[in-house]
Amino acid sequence: MVKYKVITTTDALNCLRGIHDYIKDNASKQTAQKVYGGLLDEIAALSEHPHKNSILRTVGKNRIYRRRLKWSYKIIYTIEENENLVIVVYIAHEKQNTKKFKNIFE
């Protein structure tokens, strides 16, 4: 089995921090930490079988972007096959429309 290296872009890290801060301010610090840790675990799990997640057909002309769901959040990423690399580009609530952040994918 091929293991992929997983990297997270600055935009994705900013999304993750924003999710943490929003939950901390509107729910609790413990819930924010649980969600933050859970999303980090899910990102790390992309190192194995990153192809099993659904393809986002609405974004990207030159690349295939996929999404992995964790609770009500979607982790959006692409795979660089020649480098065995997974690049997490964005993390968003699943109700957020992907077209709103289409420029991230180009």
Image (spheres, helix red, strand yellow):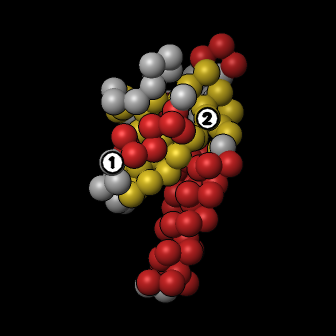
**Residue 87 horizontal/vertical position (percent):** 61, 35
Q: Secondary structure at mark 2?
A: strand
Q: Secondary structure at mark 1?
A: loop
State whether residue 93 is above or below residue 63: below
Q: Amino acid at mark 2?
A: Ile
State whether residue 33 is above or below residue 82: below
- 22 or 99, which is in the foreground? 99
- 41 or 65, which is in the foreground? 65
Q: Which mark is residue 97?
A: 1
- Looking at the image, tell me whether mark 1 or mark 2 is earlier in sequence order: 2
Q: Residue furthest left?
A: 95
Q: Residue at x 33, y 48 (%)?
A: 97
Q: Residue at x 66, y 43 (%)?
A: 9
**Residue 48 horizontal/vertical position (percent):** 55, 34
Q: How many marks?
A: 2
**Residue 22 horizontal/vertical position (percent):** 50, 75
Q: Amino acid at mark 1?
A: Asn
Q: Nearer the viewer, mark 1 or mark 2?
A: 1
Q: Residues within 10 Å of mark 1 (few under 14, many from 20)?
A: few
Q: Quadrant of the C terminus?
A: top right
Q: Which mark is residue 87?
A: 2
State whether residue 28 is above or below residue 66: below
Q: Residue at x 68, y 40 (%)?
A: 7
